Image (cartoon, coloured by chain):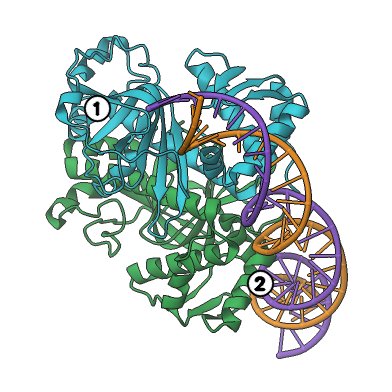
Chain colours: A green, B cyan, C orange, D purple
DNA sequence: CGTAGCCTTGAGATGCATCAAGCATTGTGG
DNA sequence: CCACAATGCTTGATGCATCTCAAGGCTACG
């Protein structure tokens, strides 16, 4: 029942919130973050939005269940997981977030966060005051539309997770997970064939609805079949087509 | 592999789209639909939004995967399921929608729908042109905020489904499902103790990540334990506290 | 009244969880 | 810098929840 999460004061004191000269127009992640699909000329309009950045060290939380919601966070560097801990002690990882991805959308519904966001390595985020976001979106419809797209994309992503959890076998889940990471690393400009798993087997298992032993065994099997090469957290995907083919045949 | 879905021409011809005098202010569902949280005085602003209604007969689809997205739909009466059919023939029910609930948010991300919406009984929806919604939201911030809340709520709901699919046993899933329906019927002003399951066992199973036989057995067991009374689609929840207690103990 | 879809129940198969032991890796303090 | 402790990972043996396959009954609808 214990995870790597190190309990820490959730609200990083103000002195850690660096007030940097932040510019969406100059950010190399801008295709991925909120501005995606907004023309370069217009990007300057968004700069007032990103007033601050915040550094989160590995194991610390960006926000936690019950925290008052007032901002979204765009991952600038690092790696996060979001985790839902229900009253009865059930623990479910609901997602992993990489640079260019957004955190905090869960909080809009009730003005309070409904998941924990935990940094899996030292990370940095852009803090987007949601009230500012809404205000600017009112005058600047591309931003408005992009925000809607991002929220909808999250809904669609979760549909995919539902398919995974609802109808895939262990082997398929792990393959889908690896392929998903691969694609996202590629989007970021990294190799889709080789990357580091920032999360533990237990966290992978929680996300995939499997026990950590099953994740481990499945990875080992993939390795013995020549599909991948695993060495601890380092993974190499040796045969992407074969991995994809694992998802093909329906479970029937 | 066959579901109750009756294939039908997805685009209901225009003559079925009734141009009614529609008024959000007068709608008895307004607490539940998009307007929720918007004061009565302001509701008149929304009327131009709801230009049309549309009737969908049981078994027909409101929209399907790949359809161009341009509208959201508020269920006025009836009952829907949303269903994701992946390329490989996997079929997953992603949700059930009751009056006052919104359909179509999945389509914003890519301008095309990513699920099918199928009426489980004769139904009627309000058609909300999304472009209108965005336009009005720009001038009328309560609507803007409410739209964001609704989208966020959907994200949070799906988190709950992920917990269900990722960590609950069959008994817990079915109990959670019944309790969820119960609460929603109560919200609509119906009895939380007695209602009709509009969907088949197979659809329940797809939603819950179980086979229809398991759903059936679990319902039978609940009945033999005196927790519920099932007669075909008719369900009576005889012991709500006991059902809730089933969700308590973690699976460990 | 007949048929098709839906539901229930049983028996047997299986995939994943559980329990357990030992190894590897990482980080830490002497 | 090394040794140790803590955490994470792997692998094996066993058990069990759920799936699968099968048969029969019920219900609703044309």
Image coords of residue B45 (percent x, y): 20, 17
Name above or below for residue D17 compared with residue A75. Answer: above
Image coords of residue A23 (percent x, y): 25, 56
Task: Please give left or right for residue A64 compared with residue B97 in the image.
Answer: right
Name above or below for residue B179 compared with residue A90. Answer: above
Residue annotated with mark 2:
A217
Q: Residue placed at 23% from the left, 38% from the top?
A: A137
CA–CA distance between discs 2 and 1?
50 Å
Image coords of residue A34 (percent x, y): 29, 51
Say which quarter of the image contains residue C9. top right
Which chain is disc 1 placed on? B
Quick one: label 1, few (<14), some, or many (20+) residues within 10 Å?
A: many
Secondary structure state at the residue bearing disc 1: strand
In terms of depth relative to the viewer, which is nearer, C1 or B171? C1
Task: Please give left or right for residue A120 compared with residue D29 in the image.
Answer: right
In terms of depth relative to the viewer, which is nearer, A121 or B4? B4
Residue annotated with mark 1:
B127
Residue furthest left as drawn: A41
In terms of depth relative to the viewer, which is nearer, A42 or A244? A244
């Amino acid at each position: 029942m214990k995870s790597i999460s190190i309990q820490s004061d959730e609200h990083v004191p103000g002195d850690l919130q660096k007030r940097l000269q932040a510019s969406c127009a100059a950010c190399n992640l801008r295709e991925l973050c909120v501005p995606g699909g907004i023309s370069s000329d217009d990007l300057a309009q968004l700069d007032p939005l990103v007033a601050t950045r915040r550094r989160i060290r590995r194991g610390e939380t960006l926000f936690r269940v019950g925290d008052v919601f007032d901002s979204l966070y765009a991952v600038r560097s690092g790696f996060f997981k979001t985790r839902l801990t229900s009253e009865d002690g059930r623990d479910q990882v609901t997602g992993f977030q990489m640079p260019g991805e957004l955190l905090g959308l869960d909080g809009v519904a009730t003005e309070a966060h409904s998941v924990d966001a935990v940094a899996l390595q030292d990370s940095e985020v852009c803090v987007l005051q949601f009230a500012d976001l809404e205000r600017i979106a009112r005058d600047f419809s591309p931003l408005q539309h992009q925000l809607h797209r991002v929220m909808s994309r999250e809904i669609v992503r979760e549909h995919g997770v539902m398919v995974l959890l609802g109808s895939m076998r262990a082997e398929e889940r792990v393959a889908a997970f690896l392929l998903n990471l691969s694609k996202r690393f590629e989007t970021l400009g990294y190799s889709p064939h080789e990357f580091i798993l920032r999360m533990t087997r237990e966290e992978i298992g929680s996300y995939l609805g499997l026990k950590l032993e099953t994740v481990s065994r499945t990875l080992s099997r993939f390795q013995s079949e020549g599909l991948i090469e695993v060495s601890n957290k380092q993974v190499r995907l040796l045969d992407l087509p074969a991995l994809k083919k694992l998802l093909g045949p329906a479970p029937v």
